[in-house]
Image (spheres, grey):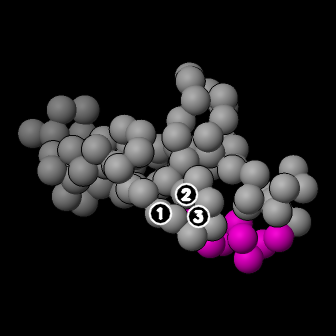
Amino acid sequence: NFGASLQILKVEIGGDSQSTDGTESSHMHDSSTVNLHTGYEWWLMKEAKKRNPNIKLYGLAWAFPSWVGNSSGDPFKFPELTARYL
């Protein structure tokens, strides 16, 4: 009924850097602009929900745009910026 009957789908939250299988565009290139039409993850999650409305969706950030760490290189140094991004 649902193909592989997946219960969970984990996708990468793109951070504008080479992290896994290519560079994945961020949904926030800066702290004030959100663009949910970047990358393929949103499309993939919508398609997964069409096939299984009960599927659980998770996102995992492998990299962060530089503004998240206030250009320090450490995204966890400024937790309020990290939370805003995620």
Q: Is 1 covered by the magenta stretch?
A: no
The reply to whether dot 1 and dot 2 touch (C-beta < 8 Å) is yes
Mark 2: amino acid? Met
Q: Secondary structure at mark 3?
A: loop
Q: Which residue is mark 1?
A: 34
Going 69% across and 44% down the picture, which residue do you hit? 63
Mark 1: amino acid? Val
Q: Secondary structure at mark 2?
A: loop
Q: How far apart are the two marked residues, 2 and 3, measured between alpha carbons?
A: 9 Å
- On the image, the x and y values in percent for residue 59 come to 51, 53
Q: Quadrant of the N terminus?
A: top left
The reply to whether dot 2 and dot 3 touch (C-beta < 8 Å) is no
Q: Which residue is mark 2?
A: 28
From this viewpoint, is residue 74 visible?
A: no
Q: Secondary structure at mark 1?
A: loop
Which badge, 2 or 3, is on the more N-terminal residue? 2
Left or right: 34 in relation to 8: right
- On the image, the x and y values in percent for residue 64 come to 69, 50
Q: How far apart are the two marked residues, 3 and 1, measured between alpha carbons?
A: 11 Å
Q: How far apart are the two marked residues, 1 and 2, measured between alpha carbons?
A: 5 Å
Q: Which residue is mark 3?
A: 86
